[in-house]
């Protein structure tokens, strides 16, 4: 117990004792109070001391009213290259991690430069490293000196000479920009509409100005963002009492009351005593109210469509009823809209007063996304004076299930493969089919429609026509759903996993309708596997997996502290993947792990086709570097003979597939 708390308790105790003696004296059952001026002055001094302590507490505290979340806003999904912009921001604005961040950026630029030199000059990695260090790989002086082993000695050429200050860090950033531009030129990559001056103000550097440097805690959501004082809404109980606290709204009134009464008594001014007495009444009013009974709040939700498709708009109507015996004078309600949803009309908020038995309603419209969604309603209730605030979560039983429609709108070509089922994969074996293969001698039991009747009319001998057999392929749609894959070009646009799943629902149907056996898998910390199969039950399992499996969630995974040995996220897929299964890999190719996965699958004998949604941009330095790295990965995969579809989400996937087929032919 500190000194301030001890003094406060002593003074409060003395005040209570004095009040009791005064009441007893007025009632004539206690000792008479001393009438001298010393006793009155002492009372005034004690009151002023308590007032000063209250003033000190007021200055050291703030009003603790809850800062509400913003469920209307979509979650922020970082664009590719965001980490490079963060590192530059730390160097220039925060001036820490100078050497560490510089080394990381240099390593990425060096790796990109070596890849470009190898592709351009068709040389080994060691030869490319030698060319890079010798500086004869480019005519750009800044780019050449950036990787050169020799130091220019003037503090402006090499990385080793750039130390410490913000001006030198800004100079380093300019060198990085020049190197990236030179790499793009050598790799025949163009940045359309890239404006460096506008990019920094609108990119991550601009977003983080004035902010903290703790953006590595995982993807932000609309409810546990830094602007909200509430930590999380991830609850399973129908009612959860989060917190009850004083708002300190009346703390200043208490200070005024004590000081006014004490000073009025000490200087014998009735007016000050009267003013202080009024303030004492307000203080007593603030202290006398009860905690709002939010446990009696009942919530019901109604949806305009109970089984919508992804992208549909659904009107949500929320009815809140006070079933308790007392009034809720100040009730603020915020419906915590699920992260994947986008509020298009209305507001998921209500500020109301509910007497016992009363109800109120509000509605809003959202654009829904796949999943089985149950979400809570945040109740912020205050008493009449507003001195006490209670935070509670009420989660109704109503849930909204959104499953994708498996419609065949996007045709996807498969590659030659032999299996036991009929389908559309051409083989070199004759049999039943559509395309002519050969003519052979008639065998007993051959169907009548395959007899060559023209030959029989000409020669009188029976012969049977064989067609090129078409057999079904085993195909696995494989998704990259690691945290790195949840990247979007800009805020408000769908991230790569959403784009991949939406496209895959069409591809799945197209392949299935063509008679192939199609399965689904994803590599992440959460195992996801549906073996290639057929039948209506298989289709329904695929729909449920696309809608509800956590590995294919529309919400980016949060960073979890996983103890133990690192497990390759592809381990469970490789164990179950059939040896003759083709693989359609959906990935934004955000890092080398995704391209390495494709190469391993190709080496294991699987025919791999990559569908890569492009979520890169060219607005910032980091985004331009990420774009270059992705283009290099695509080029390396194609050189290895792996099919890759570079998909611009602004275009229909069908058009990209047609362009790719022309290139493959």
Image: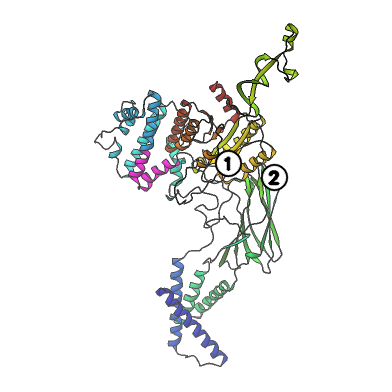
Number of numbered discs on residues: 2
Q: Look at the picture and state if 592 lies above or below 424.
A: below
- Mainly helix, strand or loop, the magenta region? helix
Up the image or down, 298 lies above or below 499; here it is below
- Dividing the image into 4 quarters, which one contains the N terminus? bottom left
Highlighted magenta segment, given as a residue range: 82-105
Disc 2 secondary structure class: loop
Q: Callout 1: few (<14), some (14-19), or many (20+) C-alpha neighbours within 10 Å?
A: many
Q: Quadrant of residue 453?
A: top right
Q: Position of residue 12 (x, y in %)?
A: 48, 79
Q: CA distance from mark 1 to mark 2?
A: 25 Å
Q: Which residue is mark 2?
A: 307
Q: Crowding at label 2, few (<14), some or many (≥20) Cα neighbours within 10 Å?
A: few
Residue at image point 42% right, 27% down: 187
Residue sitting at the far top: 458
Residue reaching furthest to the left: 153
Task: Describe residue 365's horizontal placement relative to residue 253 as left or right.
Answer: right
The residue labelled by disc 1 is 529
State the image coordinates of residue 69 (x, y, percent, origin top left).
55, 54
């Amino acid at each position: 117990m500190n000194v301030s708390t001890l003094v406060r308790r002593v003074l409060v105790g003395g005040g209570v004792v004095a009040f009791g003696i005064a009441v007893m004296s007025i009632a004539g059952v206690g000792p008479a109070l001393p009438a001298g001026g010393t006793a009155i002055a002492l009372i005034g001094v004690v009151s002023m001391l308590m007032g000063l302590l209250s003033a000190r507490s007021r200055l050291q505290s703030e009003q603790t009213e809850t800062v509400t979340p913003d469920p209307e806003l979509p979650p922020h999904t970082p664009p590719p290259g965001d980490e490079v912009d963060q590192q530059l921001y730390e160097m220039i604005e925060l001036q820490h991690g100078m050497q560490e961040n510089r080394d990381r950026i240099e390593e990425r630029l060096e790796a990109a430069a070596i890849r470009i030199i190898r592709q351009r000059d068709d040389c080994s990695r060691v030869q490319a490293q030698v060319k890079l260090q010798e500086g004869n790989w480019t005519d750009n002086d800044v780019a050449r000196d950036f990787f050169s082993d020799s130091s220019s000695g003037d503090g402006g050429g090499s990385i080793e000479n750039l130390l410490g200050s913000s001006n030198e860090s800004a100079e380093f950033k300019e060198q990085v920009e020049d190197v990236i531009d030179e790499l793009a030129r050598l790799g025949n990559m163009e940045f359309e509409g890239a404006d460096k001056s506008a990019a920094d103000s609108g990119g991550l550097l601009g977003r983080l100005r004035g902010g903290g440097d703790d953006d590595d805690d995982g993807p932000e959501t609309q409810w546990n963002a830094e602007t909200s004082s509430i930590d999380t809404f991830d609850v399973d109980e129908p009612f959860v009492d989060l917190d009850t606290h004083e708002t300190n709204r009346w703390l200043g009134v208490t200070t005024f009351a004590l000081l006014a009464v004490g000073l009025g008594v000490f200087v014998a001014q009735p007016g000050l005593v009267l003013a202080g007495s009024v303030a004492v009444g307000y203080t007593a009013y603030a202290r006398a109210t009860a905690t709002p009974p939010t446990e009696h709040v009942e919530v019901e939700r109604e949806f305009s469509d109970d089984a919508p498709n992804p992208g549909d708009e659904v009107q949500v109507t929320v009815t809140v009823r006070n079933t308790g015996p007392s009034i809720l004078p100040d009730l603020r309600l915020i419906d915590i809209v699920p992260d994947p949803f986008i509020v298009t009309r209305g507001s998921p908020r209500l500020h109301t007063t509910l007497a016992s038995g009363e109800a109120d309603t509000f509605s809003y419209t959202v654009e829904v996304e796949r999943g089985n969604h149950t979400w809570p309603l945040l109740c912020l209730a205050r008493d009449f004076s507003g001195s006490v605030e209670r935070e509670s979560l009420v989660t109704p039983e109503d849930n909204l299930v959104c499953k994708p429609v498996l419609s065949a709108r996007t045709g996807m070509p498969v590659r030659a493969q032999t299996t036991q089922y009929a389908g559309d994969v051409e083989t070199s074996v004759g049999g039943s089919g559509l395309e002519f293969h050969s003519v052979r001698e008639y065998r007993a039991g051959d169907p009548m429609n395959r007899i060559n009747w023209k030959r029989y009319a000409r020669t009188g001998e029976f012969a049977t026509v064989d067609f090129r057999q078409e057999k079904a392929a085993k195909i696995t749609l494989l998704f990259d759903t690691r945290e790195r894959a949840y990247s979007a070009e800009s805020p408000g646009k769908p991230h790569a996993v959403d784009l991949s799943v939406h496209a895959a629902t069409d591809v799945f149907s197209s392949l299935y309708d063509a008679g192939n056996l199609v399965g689904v898998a994803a590599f992440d910390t959460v195992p996801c596997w549906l073996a290639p199969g057929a039948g209506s039950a298989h289709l329904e399992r695929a729909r449920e997996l696309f809608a509800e499996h956590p590995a294919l969630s529309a919400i980016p995974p949060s960073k979890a502290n996983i103890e133990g040995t690192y497990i390759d996220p592809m381990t469970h897929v490789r164990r179950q993947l059939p040896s003759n299964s083709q693989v359609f890999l959906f990935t934004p190719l955000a890092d080398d792990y995704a391209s390495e996965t494709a190469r391993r699958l190709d080496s294991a004998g699987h025919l791999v086709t990559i569908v890569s949604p492009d979520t890169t941009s060219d607005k910032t330095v980091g985004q331009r570097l990420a774009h270059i790295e992705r283009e290099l990965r695509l080029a390396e995969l194609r050189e290895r003979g792996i099919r890759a579809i570079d998909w611009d989400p602004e275009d229909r996937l069908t058009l990209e597939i047609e362009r790719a087929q022309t290139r493959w032919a």
